[in-house]
Amino acid sequence: MTVLKKTVLAGAILFGLMGTAYASSAPDIVVLLCDDMNSFYTSFDGDPNADTPNLDKLAAQSAMFTRCYAASTVCMPSRTSLVAGLYPHSTGAWGNANEQLIPEHLTSMFSDFKKAGYATSMIGKTHWMSGNGFKKFYDSKADYYERLGIDYFEDVATMFASRGGSGVYQDFLKKIGKFEANSKDMTDRLRSNQYLVRPSLLEPNETCDWMMTDFATEYIRKVPEDKPFMMMVGYSYPHSPYDPLDEYAARYESGSMALRDNVKPFKKYGMDYTLDTVRQTKAAYLAKISFIDDMVGRVIDSLKESGRWDNTVLVFTADHGMAIGEHGNITKGRFWEEVTRVPMLIRIPGLTDSGMKLPALSQLIDLYPTLLDAAGGELSPHVSGRSLMPAIRNPGETVRDAVFCEIQQDGMLNYMVRNDRYKWYIEKDKEYLYDLDSDRFEKNNLIKSEDHHAVATELRERLRRFLMEEQINYAAGYKPLVQREKEKMGK
C-alpha cells in the first residue's frame, strides 16, 4: 500500500467513511470558483427569485458554510489568498493593480496537492497578478504556473480581457467572426457603465465561461486514472458586464424582483438607479448566475459519466461578493455582508450526503487546508487558513473565534473583523460597528454608541492580535553564526 493510500485510509476511518470510495483511493478534488457573486442571490440561500436547480441539488448534499468570508473584497488579493492560504498582508497583493506574485517559495495549494500524489490543473481565470511583473523572474507564465505546482493550465480570457491580445478565447471569437464586435461592445461598456443592462452579442456556447467548462469536462474525460486529480475552474460570471444571454434573461421578470431591505435608490456613472432600475439589474445578474448554474451542471454530468462522481469532493464558491443596490450602490471593495461573504458549498461523498448548514465562522482561505485535510495530504507550515473538517465532522464545532478582511483603497489599508455577533471595520479612517444579530442589513452604525464602546474596543484589540499573530516568520530555522560554528566542531 502506498503512503498516500495509507494516509487516505486513516482519514477514512477518522471520518467514519469505511465502505465508501475513500477507503480504497484518494478523492478527486474539483473547485468551481465564480466571480463577484452575492452569496444571498441563490435559491439554496433563500432568494425567492433565483433559479439555480443544479446548485440547489449540490447544496442538498454539501456542507454549506453560511458565514464564510473572503480575505479581501476584490479579485486579485482574494484569489491569491485562496491559492496561497494567506491573507493579503502576507502575499503583498492588496489590490488589483499589483504585479506581486503568489510567493513561489511559500508553495501553494497546487504544490501541496502535487506532493500528496495528485495531478493538478487550473482552468479559466486566475487573476493572481497584473501586468508583466512575472517576466522579472520567469521565462513565461507557463514557467511560473509550473513552479506553483500546476501540471495542466488553460488560460481563458474573461469578457473584458478578451478585447485584445491573443489567446485561445480571442482566437475563437475571431474564428466565428465576432471578435471585433465583441471588443467594441466590451470597450463601450467599460467607458460608459459596465453595470448597465444590455443583452449579450453572443450565444451561450460562445462565452468564455462555456469554453472554460469545455476544457474542464475534457480534462475530466481524459485525465489518467493512475492518480487522483485536483482541478480548479476560475469562472468569470456573474462579474460585469451585465449582459444577460437571451435564453437566461427570459427566465426573469424584473418587475417581480424582491429587493433586500437595505436597497435604496442611488446615482452611478451619471445614471439614476431607481428601485425599478435595480430590479432590472438584479434580473440580469440572476440570469448570469443561472448560466453559471448550468455550467456547474455540465461539470457534474461529466464527473458522473466518467464514473468519478462518487469519489469526488466538489466545491462551489466565489472570490468575493457584490452589492446589487444594497447600501445604495453597485460595487465591490467594501466590507458589507453582500460583498465580504461568499457562498461555500463543500460536497464530500459519505460525509455530507444529507446536506448540512454550518454557522461556523470561516474564511475562503480555509478551503485550501480543508481540501488537503480531506485528501489526506500534508499542509505547508506557513498557511494561515484552517481546516474546516472539524466543523464538517461535528456540526456546531467552532473553527475560528473571528474572521478578517483587508483591502487597500486610495493608498490606505483598511481592515474588517467580525466575531460571532458583531462586525467592526475601518474604511478611510472612518469606523463602523454593527450588531449582525439585530441588524443583519447593517443600517445602524453603533460606533458612537456608549453602550457598545467595550465591544468596539474588543474588536480593535482582536484586529491588533490578528496582525501580530498572522505573520510569516521568515527567520524560522535561522541559527546564529556562533551556533553554526560550534555545531561544525561538534559542540
Image: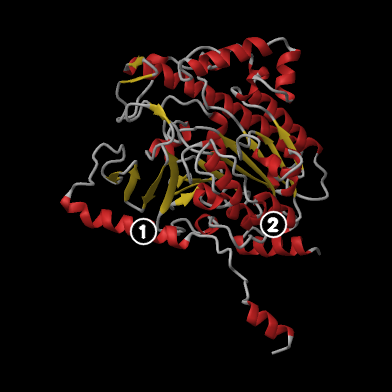
Residue placed at 27% from the left, 53% from the top? Answer: 456
Q: Where is residue 418 in the image (x, y as percent from the top left)?
A: 36, 50
Q: Kindly indicate whether the residue at mark 1 contacts the one at mark 2 (C-beta within 8 angstroms).
A: no
Quarter-wise, where is residue 233 in the image?
top right
- Please tell me whether mark 2 sits on a helix, a strand or a loop: loop
Considering every residue shown, the one lying at the far bottom of the view is 491
- Please tell me whether mark 1 sits on a helix, a strand or a loop: helix
Using a 10 Å C-alpha cutoff, classify the residue at mark 1 as few (fewer than 14 neighbours), some (14 to 19) or many (20 or more): some
| Distance in Å between CA atoms under marks 2 and 1 | 44 Å
Residue placed at 76% from the left, 55% from the top? Answer: 117
Q: Where is residue 42 in the image (x, y as percent from the top left)?
A: 47, 31
Pointer 2: what residue? 19
Where is the N terminus found, in terms of image quarters?
Answer: bottom right
Relative to the observer, which residue lies in front, 85 or 161? 161
Residue 200 visible (yes or no): yes
Name which of mark 2 and mark 1 comes first in the sequence: 2
Identify which amino acid the numbered label 2 is placed on.
Gly
Residue 359 visible (yes or no): no
Residue placed at 61% from the left, 40% from the top? Answer: 128
In the image: residue 285, left or right of residue 313: left
In the image: residue 201, left or right of residue 1: left
In the image: residue 111, left or right of residue 199: right
